[in-house]
């Protein structure tokens, strides 16, 4: 698997910050910065050779968009999906939540294209709208996916908040998730083993976009570096963080800017996406 240059991921966070700055300070559902983000990502992915689709939906009286990007290779009957939400809250630019997952996925997609990867499984990337209104974009996608298409999904990996400033290293717990989820968890953990970073399993319940896939029986997994919760003493020691402080003190606030990102966590989590994709989709 490739080592994704973290400087390239940071450059994309700069683009997302610029888009927010030029559109009233956020990238939220119902605001111009949301569509501007989707348009920007689509043009990048089109240029890389992905087959992109923008799925429109309506929520809270406003139009929202999901961006889907398929890599035209591999067995179309076995699809590995990877995604994260592309909307911010109205309070701010949403750079850690979820510019980090958004940019990480884009840079992994770029690596796929640059290697002209010929995986066994088909790869499908997704950037979801209206997560912050209650997981609406991913819910819309899953609800409108024909059963035959749903059956082709071998797994869904979710990345929401992967560069929290006081970073924890959490991998989604497979407990209570569809059969097959443990393989996704084990693969992500295998990446962190190579870095010597200890992870913790976390039960996120229905707090992010994997929920609709899990409800539909698709194996799910993902990584997370923490939100409003406070880091314990024990976690601070193993993760070189600050005990008694939030993982992300700017969670859902205007200060969630390009300055609100732990570059080491961003680097590791983006490399984890690439490792999982290469491990699960190539032989
Ligand atoms: N989904 C929540 C949000 O975007 C936060 C969160 C992210 C919770 C990841 C759990 C896992 O605000
Ligand atoms: Ca890297
Ligand atoms: Zn629709
Ligand atoms: Zn959020
Ligand atoms: Zn989020």
Image (cartoon, rainbow, N blue to C red):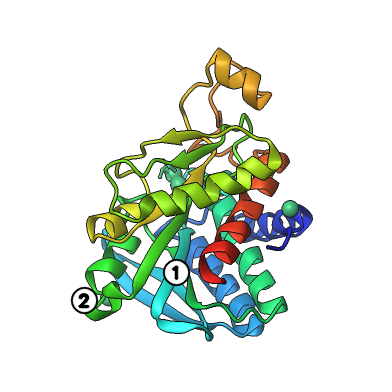
Circle 2 residues within 10 Å: few <14, some 14–19, many ≥20:
few
Q: Residue furthest front?
A: 283
**Residue at numbered disc 1:** 80
Q: Residue at (57%, 21%) from the top-left corner? A: 235
**Mark pair 2, 1: CA separation:** 16 Å
Rendered view: 250 above or below 21: above
Residue at 77% over, 57% down: 5
196 vs 202, nearest the viewer: 196
> Which secondary structure, mark 1?
strand
| Residue displayed at 42% across by 74% down | 79
Q: Position of residue 178 (x, y in %)?
A: 28, 53
Q: Which residue is mark 2?
A: 147
Q: Is mark 1 within 8 Å of ligand 1?
A: no
Disc 2 is placed on an element classified as: helix
Give whichever of 256, 273 is nearer the camera.
Answer: 273
Mark toward the start of the polypeptide (2 vs 1): 1
Residue 143: which disc?
none
Quarter of the view holding residue 111: bottom right
The image quadrant that residue 263 belongs to is: top right
Q: Quadrant of the N terminus?
A: bottom right
Q: Compare residues 233 and 66 and report the one nearer the observer.
A: 233
How many numbered markers are drawn?
2
* 1 is higher (above) or lower (below) than 110: above
- Position of 264 compared to 78: left or right? right
| Nearer to us in this view, 116 or 45 | 116
* Residue 67, percent from left and from top: 45, 72
Q: Position of residue 149 (x, y in %)?
A: 29, 78
Query: Is residue 23 among the parts visible in the rendering?
Result: no
Q: Quadrant of the C terminus?
A: bottom right
Q: Is residue 55 visible?
A: yes
Which residue lies at the image location 45% right of the left edge and 83% below the top edge?
Answer: 75
């Amino acid at each position: 698997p490739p080592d994704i240059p973290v400087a390239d991921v940071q450059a994309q966070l700069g683009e997302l910050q610029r888009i927010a700055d030029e559109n009233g300070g956020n990238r939220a559902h119902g605001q111009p910065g949301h569509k501007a983000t989707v348009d920007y990502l689509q043009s990048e992915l089109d240029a890389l050779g992905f087959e992109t689709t923008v799925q429109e939906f309506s929520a809270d009286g406003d139009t929202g968009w999901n961006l889907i990007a398929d890599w035209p290779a591999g067995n179309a009957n076995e699809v590995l999906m990877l995604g994260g939400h592309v909307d911010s809250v109205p309070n701010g630019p949403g750079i850690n939540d979820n510019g980090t997952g958004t940019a990480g996925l884009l840079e992994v997609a770029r690596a796929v294209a640059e290697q002209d990867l010929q995986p066994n499984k088909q790869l499908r990337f997704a950037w979801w709208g209206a997560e912050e209104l209650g997981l609406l974009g991913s819910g819309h996608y899953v609800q409108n996916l024909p059963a035959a298409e749903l059956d082709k999904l071998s797994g869904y990996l979710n990345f929401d908040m992967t560069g929290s400033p006081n970073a924890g290293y959490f991998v989604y717990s497979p407990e209570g998730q569809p059969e097959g989820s443990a393989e996704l968890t084990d693969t992500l953990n295998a990446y962190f083993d190579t870095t010597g970073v200890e992870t913790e399993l976390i039960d996120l319940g229905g707090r992010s976009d994997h929920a609709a896939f899990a409800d539909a029986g698709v194996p799910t997994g993902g990584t997370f570096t923490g939100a409003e919760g406070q880091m314990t003493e024990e976690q601070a020691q193993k993760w070189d963080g600050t005990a008694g402080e939030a993982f992300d003190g700017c969670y859902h606030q205007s200060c969630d800017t390009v300055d609100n990102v732990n570059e080491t966590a961003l680097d590791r989590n983006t490399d984890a996406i690439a490792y999982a994709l290469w491990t699960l989709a190539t032989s």
